[in-house]
Image (cartoon, grey):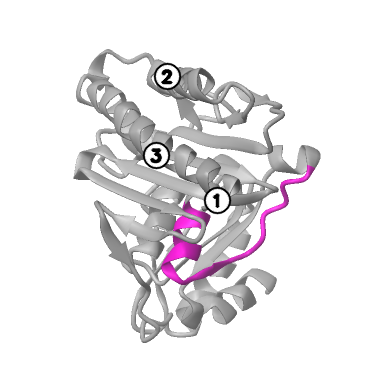
Amino acid sequence: MSMQDTDIDQRFSLARSIAEEAGRLALDYFENRGSLVIETKRDLQDVVSIADRNVETLIRDRVAATFPRDGFLGEEFGHVEGSSGFTWVVDPIDGTAPFVNGMPTWCVSIAVLRGGVPVVGVVHVPCDDELYAAAAGRGASLNGKPLTLDPTRTIQNAMTGIGCNTYVAPERVGQIIAGLLGIGGNFIRNGSGALMLAYVAAGRLVGYYEPFMRAWDCMAGYCLVKEAGGDYLPFPVEGEALLGGHPVLASNLSAYSELLALHQG
């Protein structure tokens, strides 16, 4: 085993451990959400609470204690450059709107990048007691069971996840959904892009598309989908591009070209 393989394995192990610990903390907040103070960011649909901030702080502290030279990008506290070649990309609670409204479709999303490529992806879903985990060349799993995508699943015989937010014009969202329905597909949106990407890796969805997402929402899911046998649209990660929003598309290979056409249309 090479030194680089060892480096990935060590971070993979830590990411799984941290995701479970962070999930327990987030679940405690969820079960006591009546006492949370909810704040808004850009608009009334973009919300945050002390739960998001404290869960991210826990993750940052655990990473810094073991890999102090690694970079870190989190939704709540931004980007810290590293010097090791590895960068952690984290959404402490993806699906905050479902979270604060008492719905279970939220998760903790933790990825590790090396050379701009997601080499570790872990998504923990506390309400369902599910841990999705993947690392480059090591496959993807759900609660330890290997995930392998079924090539017979297509746009026409499976569900596709669609995401939207106020960065995307309502007309564009309508165009995407109309296009999907027009080719015989159907769609779902559950409020968490990271979770729907994990569902793609598990074969529950055949693909996922959102015109504007941040790195912390998609990098863990991208690693999961790739290791399960799917593909994804590259996400710009060089310099300031890592901090910006970009289109996100990931799917079973059987659906990729049709979803790409929806994106390009």
- Give the quarter of the image for residue 129: top left
Residue 152 vertical position relative to residue 79 in the rendered view, above or below: below
Q: Amino acid at mark 2?
A: Leu
Residue position for label 3? 13
Residue 149: percent from left, percent from top: 37, 74
Image quarter where the C terminus lies is bottom right
Is 202 displayed left or right of 109 in the figure? left
Residue 210 percent coordinates (x, y)? 55, 57
Residue 215 x %, y %: 60, 44
10 Å crowding of disc 2: few (<14), some (14-19), many (20+): some
Whether residue 96 is situated above or below residue 255 in the rendered picture: above
Residue at 79% across, 39% down: 239
Q: Foreground residue, 52 or 5? A: 5
Determine the secondary structure under disc 1. Answer: strand
Which sits in the foreground, 136 or 250?
136
Q: Amino acid at mark 3?
A: Ser
Q: Is residue 11 visible?
A: yes
Residue 189 location (% of width, % of height): 39, 56
Q: Residue furthest right?
A: 239
Residue 178 is labelled as: none
Amino acid type at circle 1 is Val
Disc number for residue 58: 2
Which tag, 1 or 2, sits closer to the chain's start?
2
Mark 3: secondary structure: helix
* Region in magenta: 221-238
Residue 258 in which image quadrant: bottom right
Q: Are marks 3 and 1 in contact (CB under 8 Å)?
A: no
Mark linked to residue 119: 1
Mark 1: few/some/many CA within 10 Å (<14, 14-19, 20+): many
Residue pictured at 49% horizontal, 85% vertical: 183
